[in-house]
Amino acid sequence: MENPQTSSRARPTPLSPATAGLGAAALLVLAVLAGIVSVLPAQGQPLGMLIGILGSLTVALVLPAARCHPLLATVWSALAFSLPVALVLMNPGLPLGVALAFGAAGVWVILTTAACRHTRR
């Protein structure tokens, strides 16, 4: 009898194309929260760090089969943590902040789309 854990490691579960959209939307929500927090005078930096940690912990919501896709889970954690922290610490203003947010969302969409195509083969 075959071990179910071994078979799932050998062939990762296919990703749905909705994973890319859900992750991009979640990154944009994190960026909006970071923008709101950066306006606060004294509590902006600790709250930005907290938003980054919470965003990193949402990997199970964005990537349901995170165990089967460890690279995507690591990329999500890095993007979801670094985007709000960078936006709060840099306080880049609206144009650069929007560019950073959409850039991070674009990176996530590109990587998940490539992984989706790779797992469907």
Image (cartoon, helix red, strand yellow):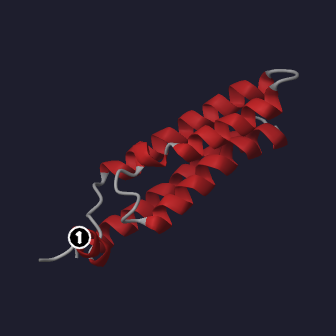
**Where's residue 15, x and y in %?**
30, 59
Kind of residue at badge 1: Arg
Q: Quadrant of the N terminus?
A: bottom left
Spot occupied by residue 51 in the image (x, y as percentages of width and height) = 65, 35
Residue at 48 percent of width and 48 percent of height: 59
Check the image and report above or below for 105 versus 13: above
Residue 113 placement: quadrant: bottom left
Q: Among all residues in the image, which is located at the extreme left?
A: 1
Number of marks drawn: 1
Q: Depth check: give the residue in front, 99 or 31.
A: 31
Residue 81 as seen in the image, left or right of residue 105: right
Front-most of residues 13 and 120: 13
Expressed as whole percent of the image width and height from the top left, the position of residue 10 reads 28, 78
In the image: residue 16, left or right of residue 26: left
From the viewer's side, name the closer residue of 83 and 47: 47
Answer with left or right where residue 36 lies relative to residue 56. right
* Residue in the picture at 80% in, 28% down: 44
Name the residue at 54% across, 44% down.
Answer: 57
Question: Which residue is depicted at the point 45% across and 56% down?
Answer: 109
Residue receiving disc 1:
120
Spot the residue most to the front. 1
Residue 115 visible to an observer of this rendering: yes
Count residues near mark 1 (Cα–Cα under 10 Å), then give few for <14, some for 14-19, many for 20+: few
Q: Residue 94: tell me if it is visible.
A: no
In the image, residue 7 sits, relative to residue 38, either above or below, namely below
Residue 3 lies, in percent from the top left, at: 21, 73
Determine whether the residue tagged by mark 1 lies in a helix, strand or loop. helix
Above or below, 12 relative to 30 = below
Q: Quadrant of the C terminus?
A: bottom left
Image side of residue 103 versus residue 40, left or right: left
